[in-house]
């Protein structure tokens, strides 16, 4: 197992809802990574019962708003020179663009290819988003991204 102290410069994506680790791992393209990565599943957690953790021995670019949209309970530790340099607590973004597709067949985004798929957060507690064009409802955290 890859421990935090074996990471020199990299990211530890912690408190991933158990079961989402695989999806986030492949969304980040880590299945094709040439550097050291670890996906640890079903780690006992006092917060959620069980969680998944991803450790990456490389500082990669992550779109934190999309990651927060996938799972807002995640925290990301940025490791620099073997120390936690920064802790990022993710939240649901106010707006996502081209992350999910509107499913309404009559929506303008379904008929016009050039229009971006924009969803806005309307209810933070319920993680509900509305399509900007047709008000189609989408609930975040169900693990569906482009
Ligand atoms: Zn729509």
Image: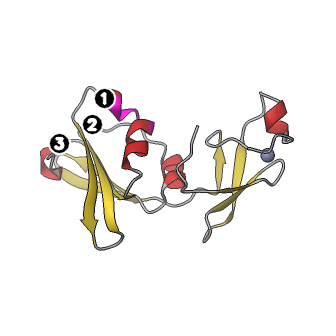
- Label annotation for residue 33: 1
Residue at the image point whose x is 25% and y is 49% from the top: 79
Residue 17: % across, % down? 40, 59
Q: Give the camera-side residue of 74 and 31.
A: 31
x, y percent for residue 113: 78, 28
> Considering only order in the chain, which callout, 2 or 3, is on the residue closer to the N terminus?
3
Which residue is disc 2 drawn over?
58
Category of crowding for the residue at label 3, using alpha-carbon neighbours closer than 10 angstroms: few (below 14), some (14–19), many (at least 20): some
Dot 2: element: loop
Name the residue located 61 percent from the left edge and 42 percent from the top edge: 99
Among numbered discs 1 and 2, the one appearing first in the sequence: 1
Residue appearing at x 58%, y 37% in the figure = 146
How far apart marks 3 and 2 lie (CA) works out to: 8 Å
Q: Please give left or right for residue 35 compared with residue 132 in the image.
A: left
* Residue found at x 79% / y 35%: 110
Q: Please say if 29 is above or below 12.
A: above
Q: Tags 1 and 2 in contact by the CB under 8 Å rule? A: yes
**Residue 59: image location, x then y, percent:** 31, 39
Q: Is 89 inside the magenta-drawn segment?
A: no
Q: Are marks 3 and 1 in contact (CB under 8 Å)?
A: no
In the image, which residues are magenta? 27-31
Instruction: Identify whether 113 is placed above or below 108.
Output: above
In the rendered structure, the answer to whether residue 79 lies left or right of residue 72 reads left
The answer to whether 94 is drawn above or below residue 59 in the figure is below
Q: CA distance from mark 1 to mark 2?
A: 10 Å
């Amino acid at each position: 197992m890859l421990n935090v102290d074996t990471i020199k410069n990299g990211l530890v994506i912690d408190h991933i809802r158990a079961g989402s680790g695989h999806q986030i791992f492949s969304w980040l393209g880590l299945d094709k990574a040439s550097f050291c990565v670890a996906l640890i599943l079903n780690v006992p957690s006092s917060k959620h019962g069980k969680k998944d953790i991803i450790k990456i021995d490389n500082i990669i670019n992550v779109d934190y708003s999309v990651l927060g949209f996938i799972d807002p309970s995640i925290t990301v530790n940025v490791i620099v020179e073997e120390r936690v340099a920064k802790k990022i607590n993710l939240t649901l973004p106010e707006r996502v663009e081209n992350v999910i597709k509107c499913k309404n067949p009559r929506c303008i985004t379904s008929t016009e290819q050039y229009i971006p798929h924009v969803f806005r957060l309307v209810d933070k507690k319920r993680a509900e988003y509305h399509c900007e064009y047709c008000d189609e409802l989408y609930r975040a955290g169900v693990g569906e991204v482009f």
